[in-house]
Amino acid sequence: MAGLVAVTGIMGVAVLLRYTIVPDEDKMIRSLSPELRAEYERNKHKRREQHDAIMTQIIENSKSDKPIWDVSPQAPSNKRAADPGK
Protein backbone atom coordinates (compact mmCIF):
# COMPACT_ATOMS: atom_id res chain seq x y z
CA MET A 1 0.00 0.00 0.00
CA ALA A 2 2.84 2.38 0.81
CA GLY A 3 4.40 1.68 -2.60
CA LEU A 4 1.16 2.63 -4.33
CA VAL A 5 1.02 5.92 -2.43
CA ALA A 6 4.66 6.63 -3.28
CA VAL A 7 4.18 5.91 -6.98
CA THR A 8 1.03 8.04 -7.08
CA GLY A 9 2.86 10.88 -5.34
CA ILE A 10 5.81 10.72 -7.73
CA MET A 11 3.51 10.66 -10.76
CA GLY A 12 1.50 13.57 -9.37
CA VAL A 13 4.65 15.64 -8.85
CA ALA A 14 5.83 14.77 -12.35
CA VAL A 15 2.55 15.89 -13.92
CA LEU A 16 2.54 19.09 -11.87
CA LEU A 17 6.13 19.89 -12.88
CA ARG A 18 5.38 19.19 -16.52
CA TYR A 19 2.49 21.65 -16.58
CA THR A 20 4.36 24.35 -14.68
CA ILE A 21 7.78 24.11 -16.36
CA VAL A 22 7.11 23.15 -20.00
CA PRO A 23 5.60 26.07 -21.94
CA ASP A 24 2.78 25.50 -24.40
CA GLU A 25 3.17 26.43 -28.06
CA ASP A 26 1.52 29.85 -27.70
CA LYS A 27 3.82 30.84 -24.83
CA MET A 28 6.88 29.81 -26.80
CA ILE A 29 5.79 31.79 -29.85
CA ARG A 30 5.10 34.88 -27.73
CA SER A 31 8.57 34.62 -26.22
CA LEU A 32 10.30 34.68 -29.63
CA SER A 33 11.87 37.82 -30.98
CA PRO A 34 9.74 39.73 -33.51
CA GLU A 35 11.95 38.58 -36.40
CA LEU A 36 11.69 34.91 -35.44
CA ARG A 37 7.97 35.23 -34.80
CA ALA A 38 7.48 36.70 -38.29
CA GLU A 39 9.54 33.88 -39.83
CA TYR A 40 7.50 31.33 -37.89
CA GLU A 41 4.27 32.82 -39.20
CA ARG A 42 5.59 32.93 -42.79
CA ASN A 43 6.58 29.25 -42.68
CA LYS A 44 3.52 27.98 -40.83
CA HIS A 45 1.53 27.36 -44.02
CA LYS A 46 4.43 25.48 -45.65
CA ARG A 47 4.86 23.24 -42.59
CA ARG A 48 1.11 22.53 -42.55
CA GLU A 49 1.18 21.53 -46.24
CA GLN A 50 4.16 19.22 -45.63
CA HIS A 51 2.41 17.64 -42.66
CA ASP A 52 -0.79 17.11 -44.65
CA ALA A 53 1.16 15.53 -47.53
CA ILE A 54 2.91 13.14 -45.15
CA MET A 55 -0.36 12.22 -43.44
CA THR A 56 -2.04 11.60 -46.81
CA GLN A 57 0.83 9.31 -47.82
CA ILE A 58 0.63 7.46 -44.50
CA ILE A 59 -3.13 6.95 -44.88
CA GLU A 60 -2.69 5.68 -48.45
CA ASN A 61 0.08 3.32 -47.36
CA SER A 62 -1.95 2.03 -44.43
CA LYS A 63 -4.61 0.76 -46.85
CA SER A 64 -2.04 -1.55 -48.45
CA ASP A 65 -1.28 -5.01 -47.13
CA LYS A 66 2.38 -4.61 -48.04
CA PRO A 67 5.05 -3.85 -45.42
CA ILE A 68 6.21 -0.24 -45.14
CA TRP A 69 9.46 -0.89 -47.00
CA ASP A 70 7.48 -2.20 -49.99
CA VAL A 71 5.00 0.69 -50.29
CA SER A 72 7.43 3.55 -49.76
CA PRO A 73 8.86 5.16 -52.90
CA GLN A 74 12.24 3.80 -53.96
CA ALA A 75 14.97 6.43 -53.56
CA PRO A 76 18.42 5.97 -55.08
CA SER A 77 20.89 4.78 -52.48
CA ASN A 78 23.66 7.13 -53.55
CA LYS A 79 24.42 10.02 -55.91
CA ARG A 80 25.98 7.87 -58.61
CA ALA A 81 22.86 5.75 -58.91
CA ALA A 82 20.79 8.92 -59.31
CA ASP A 83 23.13 10.46 -61.92
CA PRO A 84 24.77 7.75 -64.05
CA GLY A 85 26.42 10.32 -66.36
CA LYS A 86 29.04 11.31 -63.78
Image (cartoon, grey):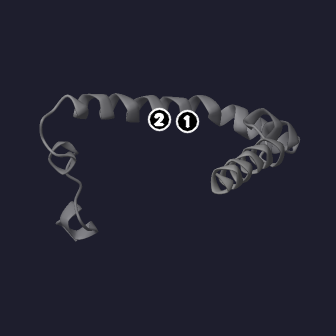
User: Horizontal placement of 60 versus 24: left or right?
Assistant: left
State the residue in front, 30 or 76. Answer: 30
> Residue placed at 72% from the left, 44% from the top?
15
Amino acid type at image mark 2 = Gln
State the residue in front, 86 or 77. Answer: 77
Q: Quadrant of the C terminus?
A: bottom left
Which quadrant of the structure image shows residue 47? top right
Judge whether 6 appears above or below 54 on screen.
Answer: below
Are there few (<14), some (14-19), or many (20+) residues within 10 Å of tag 1?
few
State the residue in front, 80 or 25. Answer: 25
Q: Position of residue 66 (x, y in %)?
A: 12, 41
Judge whether 59 appears above or below 34 on screen.
Answer: above
Which quadrant of the structure image shows residue 34? top right
Q: Position of residue 41 (x, y in %)?
A: 71, 32
Amino acid type at image mark 1 = Arg
Label of residue 59 in the image: none
**Whether label 1 touches label 2, CB < 8 Å:** yes
Residue located beneath label 2 in the image: 50
Which quadrant of the structure image shows residue 27? top right
Residue located beneath label 1 in the image: 47
Q: Secondary structure at mark 1?
A: helix
> Residue placed at 64% from the left, 36% from the top?
43
Q: CA distance from mark 1 to mark 2?
A: 5 Å
> Residue placed at 54% from the left, 30% from the top?
48
> Residue placed at 87% from the left, 42% from the top?
31
Q: Position of residue 37 (x, y in %)?
A: 79, 38
Q: Secondary structure at mark 2?
A: helix
State the residue in front, 44 or 58. Answer: 58
